[in-house]
Amino acid sequence: MNGIFSWLVRSRNKSYVQPHLDVEDDEMLYSKNNVCVHPAGGSGGTGVGPPHHTPGYLTVTAQPDAQLGHTLLLSWRPNQLMTRTGGRPWSRSVSENATRDARLAVRGDVTLLSDADDVRPPREWSGASAGQWKPDSAPAVSAASSPAGRLELPAAEEVRRLSTQSAPPSPRSGIAPDVPAVLTADLGRTRSVRVFLTPDDPGCGQLVLCSRQSRYRILHFHHGGLRRLVTLFERWSHLLGGGGAGDDGGCLLFSVCSPLVEEGEQHPEEGLQPCLTPELWPDLVTLEGAVRAPDELMQMVFFGGLDERLRPLVWPLLLGVNAIGSTEAEREERRAELEREYERISELPERLEGAARDEFHRLVTSTVDKDVVRTDPANPFFCGRANPNVQTLRRILLGFAAANPALGYTQGMSDLLAPLLETLGQPAAAYWALDALLKRSASVISPRDDVMDRQLACLRELLRLLTPELYQHLAAVEDGLELLFAHRWLLLCFRREFPEPTALRIWEACWSCPTTRHFCLFVCVAVCAAYGADVTSLSMNADAVLLHFTSLSQHMDGDVILRKARGLLHRFLSLESVPCTLATLCSGDGGGPWDLCRVTTVQCRGHPDGRPCPAAAR
């Protein structure tokens, strides 16, 4: 089970709020000449030597779309296939002037990359037959062994090296044989757009389009213009991101927001609760600081969210570190008590002796030391080996493992602790929040096989009830119902699937859900409902399903997922009956503020393995 944590994706992506882009149908928003596509191999198609540059004319136009309102249509056509207004071949460099560019006639057959065949890897043009697609063998990308011909994204430094290793040829150079007449991609139907900016000239670099099938198209900007295209992307409301994707600030990642939530799919109370802010907090507490109505607090956080300024105060209440009805004086007394206990626990590793100390160092200390220096390295709060916050992470994790030998330390716990420490600020507060997160909250589980098996069993039943088409496909695929793609979701409560601000909102929704302690399972179902259509339409096998959902990391719309999850929870609670395997899902099996709902009608479908019915004790 520990191997699941090896799938962690270390990239970070900052959320970005774009100004609105007002467009008209068929309006040209961007144009650039001499944008290159590199066929496989050198000029002779042998795969040796510098890449063959095929310059072309790139445009981005606004097209009406039933779901998005407007989508961006990107089209590229080789210079040598361009025609003047009079019909003569366009044989010289195209003008940089956008007004003149717009007058160029782009004619010929259009190769539209649709949902089933969009943004394929570049064709090996030399010697390839019509319609035969092969991975681009240029060093910028490497072909994977998947049947779909998936290509791995190049590292930012490698892409930049390739962009500067040789000067691009004159636009007069010839094109490779069998080059497609026009390449067109609907950006609203892609998964993500990645931009690699050249350090010496931010206007130059590479544009990488990733399809929903994890196939890539790379366009090379040797003559500037890429920064202007980035500005357009930042203004389009259906692209999220723009932050650095990795350690290199010159790599920008944009994710396409395509899933929508219909009004009938939403929870009836969706949109009725405001975000809990410091301005609203005094109305929720007494003069002594005790929460007047815990239910109202939970509802507000669950539906409206929590202002980050209140997190140090509210998180301990949501996690149960402090009693929900405690006064300010009681919380201060509790804080002092927990701080003294934390100081005692943090010294436990140093008190170990002999064989016990050697074993603890071998099983725990060595692993923690490796993990803490790799935890959020792009975050200034944890950047650098000598950073005192990294040492605080280490001390907390070692103390927790020593105080809880049954749980110990598992890779990934540092990823859970990092936002707790950064948000709460105090080591003792972060320690007890982690303790509550791992022990009392159902939203994050320990990597023990029995706990994971129970969660996956509930998730299978929820998929069967709420997404029957996807469930039937997974049931028909070998190992499909193992749900390997969901392991990391449950282990880290989506810590690596969304940008950190979004992931923390999902955490808060899981902690504050007023009707179940297992809201994380409904978030899992929401991801499957929002992004599972490709799984069934493309008849993916288990490996492809794992790749599909893993590659969605940092590319999903968190607001859509949360609204879908709340709607799916309401739909589940509205069922006339539920299978006995889900009997405890909405019961107050942990007490506390979640003990507000109980499903009354439970159906037992039998248990051939002889185990007692989980509903028998109810």
Image (tube, rainbow, N blue to C red):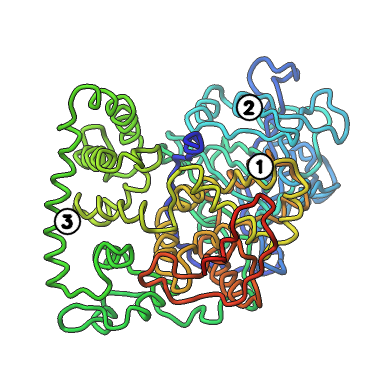
Residue 430 screen position, x and y as percent: 25, 52
Residue under label 2: 142
Q: Is residue 88 left or right of residue 349?
A: right
2 vs 3, front mark: 3
Local secondary structure at mark 1: loop
Q: Is residue 283 left or right of residue 263?
A: left
Residue 373 screen position, x and y as percent: 31, 34
**Are circles 1 and 2 on residues that touch, CB within 8 Å?**
no
Residue 19 screen position, x and y as percent: 48, 66
Residue under label 3: 338
Amino acid at pointer 3: Leu
Q: Is residue 316 left or right of residue 335?
A: right
Crowding around mark 2 (Cα neighbors within 10 Å: few <14, some 14 to 19, many 20+) is: some
Ranked by sequence position, the earlier of labels 1 and 2 is 2
Q: Which corner quadrant of the image does residue 50 belong to?
A: top right
* Residue 410 in view, yes or no: yes
